[in-house]
Each structure stands twice: as structure tokens, then as C-alpha cells.
Amino acid sequence: MRKLAVIAMTSLLASSALAATPREVTIIDGAVTLHGTMLLPDGEAKVPGVVIVAGSGATDRDGNSRLGNQTLHNDSLKLLAEQLAARGIASLRFDKRAIGASHVANLDEASLRFATYVTDAAKWTTLLAADPRVGRVVLIGHSEGALVATMAAEAVPVAGVVTIAGAGEPAAAVLRRQFHSGALPAPLVAPAEATLDSLVAGKPVAAPPPELLALFRPSVQPYLMSWLPLDPAKELAKLKVLVLIVQGSTDLQIGEGDARALAAAKPDAKLVIIPGMNHVLKTAPADRAANVATYHDPNLPLAPGLVDAIAGFVEGTK
């Protein structure tokens, strides 16, 4: 009997988590069609909504990335959207321009700028806000998406902003930290820093080392030069809306110092440190190999406390 009760409760919880209907949505921008997923809790009542902005590189709406020939499949943002839906919060997450279903044939990568992604995020926010079931919208940005969400919130009306694993200083400083933390083989650190220094100075590098082409290929350098000067703390300080800053304690890419720098720039923001949470929002040890292994496991749940922190914040907005 006890076993049957547990099974029944598990089924009930599963049904609750699935009490939302996904809907494919698009934005047409000239010859480009951007694709996203709106997840709206079932029913007729008005609900708050969130727009979830993914992080850097080839990261799709679900939080999965491509790094060269490797796919980092963890479903972090998909899990976040589903669990927020179970709390009665609508969401819209989207494939960034040129990524996933938003693939652009014959894309001129050199034409992309950081402002391109900010404008796209603002358009998605307007789309979600126009749904008659959505009463207010909060922007949620993960990693590089935290800065995108922050700047989009300067352009469109929102009830609040949530940064998750957002950098607290300009990208060049963050990249340098990552270069020295084991993200690059030791012989590549010096040439990576030299290339970065040139881009920060606004000078393209015609022939970066072949081993660094994934990061510094010439076609992506205009984008990098538009991003590197931006200061996330200064941008966050401009906001007049409620802000939640979320950071994991075992994040190998962004540290607690970043979160505290953001909080210092926005003293009325709420800061939440999630114990044991890494960059892909899963529970992970500080050990690099074991931590990175979670980037490939979509079956791992989100770190405890993350959804409660975000849902509580969204529910408290007006």
C-alpha cells in the first residue's frame, strides 16, 4: 500500500509538471525567421511570464550548446521553463539568431553585433507581453544572456530582471580568468591574451592561432569587439526595476565575486547564492572533470533552491 501511495504521488507530481501547453512561436525580421517556444500554464487565469535568454556561443533555447563537434546536452533552460510552468509562470525561450531552428542560411557572421541580440530579446519580450494570458513579464538571462537581458530591459517595459551566472565585469576580464583557470592548454594562454588585447583595442587579428579559431575566427571578431567593452555592472545599475542576482557556488566559469560585483552596483537587488550549483544550473562538485561531466547529462535535475528563488521573485513582482 505504501508503495502504491508513492507511485500515485509521483504520478500526481508528473501531471502537475506537465500542466502546461508548449507552443511554437516565431518572429520575422526581414528575411530572417527566429523560432521560440512559449510554455503557458493550462487554464484561463492571468499569469506572470518570463523570457529566458540563453548564454554565449551556439546555445539553443533549451540551454544546450555546440562546441566544435561536441554537443553539450543538459536541457538546463528547458527544465527551468518546465518547472516554472508547474509554479504557474509562463515562459518564452528562443533559439538565438543563427542558432538551432533560427539558423540563417548564408549568414554573414561578421554582421552580428551584441546589440543584435539585445534587440531580438526585446522583440521576444514584446511578443510574450502581448499574450492576453500574461499579466507581466520578467527577463531572465543566463551567462552572457544576463547582460543581454539587462540591456533589453532598458528598451522595453518589464517587471523585473533575473541574472543567472552573469559576469560582474567586462567580458575581456572574464575571458582572461577562464584562460588561466584551465579552460585553455597552458601554451595557448599567451597567444589568446595577445589576441584578446588586440580586440579590446579595436584592432582585428587577421590570423589568430588555428587552435583558437573557434573563439577568435575573423568573422566573429566584429561581434567580440562590440561586446568586450560593455560593463555588466554599469548596465545593471541603470535599471529602475526589481532585480534578482543568482549565482552557483561551484560555477567554473563565473564566480561569486561576479555576483557580488553586480549586487554592489545595484544595492537594492536581491542576491542568492545556490550552494553546489554550477554553470549549467546542476548540482556539481568543484572538481573540474566531475563538474564538466554534468554539462552532458540532461537527466540531472536543476540544483535545489534555484526554481524556488526565481519563482518567488517573479511572484513578488507587480
Image (cartoon, grey):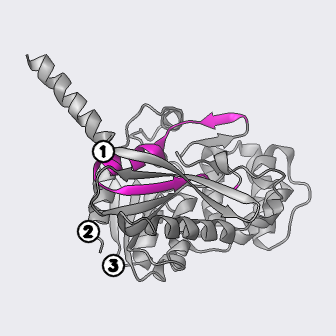
Q: Looking at the figure, which quarter contains the C terminus?
A: bottom left
Residue drawn at x 41%, y 38% as measured from the top left:
285
Task: Look at label 2 and name its amino acid.
Answer: Gly
Mark 2 element type? loop
Residue at the image position 39 percent from the left and 60 percent from the top = 246
Q: Position of residue 2 (x, y in %)?
A: 9, 19
Quadrant for the N terminus, please: top left
Residue under numbered circle 1: 304
Q: Residue furthest right?
A: 206
Say which label, 3 or 2, has the lower sequence index: 3
List x then y, in percent, for residue 288.
52, 38
The numbered mark at residue 268 is 3
Give SS at disc 1: loop
Q: Which mark is residue 75?
A: none
Q: Left or right of 278: which side holds 296?
A: right
Residue where numbered disc 2 is placed: 316
Residue toward you, 296 or 202: 296
Left or right of 162? Residue 275 is: left
Location of residue 295 with respect to 307 vertically, above or below: above
Extent of the magenta region: 69-97
For the question of whether residue 3 can be seen, the reply is yes
Can residue 89 be found in the magenta stretch? yes
What amino acid type should be assigned to the residue bearing mark 3?
Asp
Q: Residue at x 85, y 57 (%)?
A: 218
Closer to the camera, 23 or 299? 23
Q: Nearer the viewer, mark 3 or mark 2?
A: 2
